[in-house]
Image (cartoon, rainbow, N blue to C red):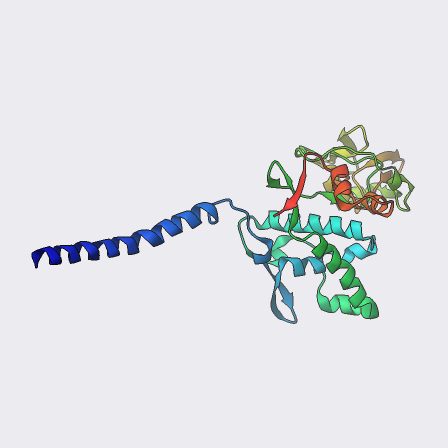
């Protein structure tokens, strides 16, 4: 009898021990393999909260990309161009979200257009345009751009000054490339004049001097009055299309001649459009403008 009681106690203890250890071991394995810190988050689990009709609507990342890419159709409807932009937008959003799996759209600092606006804008072309964009997104499902296993910031601009810029303190994936097609586009150059009074109103002085300008013409640092600022900030304050410019002083002010549109860093969207139309696929285009990158599934 005592022996039976002893065996029952041992068996009972084993059952309790197993019931404790099995879940613990399972949790450890799952945490080690799938739940470890720094593990990739699946794009299909990422949710974006967008304002809609006075309330909120929760979208998957892939659906949200549609509204981000709407303006791209103004540049090109070429499928390879749109695939490139889908990969770039997906990379940018996931990079900005970090470890988060849900975020308000307005916090992403990514331009997007609402469905109601698109229906008003596109009208009878709405379904066709959405189809163009959705096809590009689905063709590149989950694909992102990495450098040394980290998501990149997919820098881009509308049109280079003929050669892309490294910018200031460039990351390892940014390089200079010649984009001859940009120099042939309408709007490549722009001339704007400002009076001394207009400059004084903006900067407190009409005295302007470039402090640092790269060999390609992109202005890195400039002094306006007592203010030292980046070429990009200066261009923004004067609504210049680019920070690639030359300043000619006149008796009553200055004339500023710019080249390109944007800061020249990363992908020239105009150049990418031309490459796509000439037969390059989206991966070739991204590898042309960036270096040391891998295009892979997140």
Query: For residue 280, which quarter of the picture?
Result: top right
* Residue 21 screen position, x and y as percent: 31, 51
The answer to whether one can see residue 293 in this image is yes
Query: As drawn, is 270 to the left or to the right of 57?
Result: right
Q: How many labels does the image show?
A: 0
* Residue 208 screen position, x and y as percent: 78, 34
Residue at the (44%, 45%) spot, across then down: 32
Residue ranking furthest to the top: 215
The answer to whether one can see residue 202 in this image is no
* Residue 254 screen position, x and y as percent: 86, 38
Query: For residue 148, which quarter of the picture?
Result: top right
Query: As drawn, is 49 to the left or to the right of 216?
Result: left
14, above or below 161, in the image: below
Give the camera-side residue of 298 and 291: 298
Residue at the (47%, 46%) spot, across then down: 33
Query: As drawn, is 174 to the left or to the right of 177?
Result: left
Residue ranking furthest to the left: 2
54, above or below 200, in the image: below
Residue at the (74%, 41%) spot, across then down: 286
Give the camera-side residue of 219 and 207: 219
Quarter the N terminus occupies: bottom left
* Residue 141 screen position, x and y as percent: 67, 53
64, above or below 298, in the image: below
């Amino acid at each position: 009898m005592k022996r039976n009681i002893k065996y029952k106690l041992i068996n009972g203890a084993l059952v309790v021990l197993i019931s404790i250890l099995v879940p613990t071991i399972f949790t450890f394995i799952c945490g080690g393999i799938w739940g470890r810190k720094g593990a990739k988050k699946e794009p299909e689990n990422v949710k974006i909260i967008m304002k809609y009709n006075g309330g909120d609507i929760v979208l998957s990342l892939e659906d949200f990309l549609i509204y981000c890419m709407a303006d791209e159709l103004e540049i090109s409807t070429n499928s390879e161009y749109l695939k490139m932009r889908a990969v770039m937008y997906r990379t940018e959003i996931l990079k900005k979200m970090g470890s988060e799996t849900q975020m308000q759209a307005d916090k992403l600092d990514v331009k997007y257009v609402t469905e109601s606006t698109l229906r008003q804008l596109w009208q009878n072309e709405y379904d066709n345009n959405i189809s163009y964009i959705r096809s590009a997104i689905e063709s590149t499902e989950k694909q992102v751009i990495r450098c040394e296993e980290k998501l990149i910031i997919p820098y881009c601009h509308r049109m280079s000054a003929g050669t892309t810029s490294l910018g200031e303190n460039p990351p390892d994936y940014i390089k200079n490339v010649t984009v001859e097609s940009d120099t042939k586009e309408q709007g490549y150059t722009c001339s704007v004049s400002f009076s001394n009074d207009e400059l004084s109103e903006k900067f407190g002085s009409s005295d302007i001097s470039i402090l640092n300008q790269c060999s390609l013409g992109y202005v890195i640092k400039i002094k306006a009055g007592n203010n030292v600022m980046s070429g990009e900030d200066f261009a923004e304050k004067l609504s210049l299309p680019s920070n690639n410019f030359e300043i000619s002083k006149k008796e009553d002010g200055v004339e500023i001649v710019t080249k390109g549109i944007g800061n020249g860093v990363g992908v020239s969207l105009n150049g990418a459009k031309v490459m796509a139309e000439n037969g390059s696929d989206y991966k070739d285009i991204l590898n042309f403008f960036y270096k040391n990158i891998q295009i892979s599934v997140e």
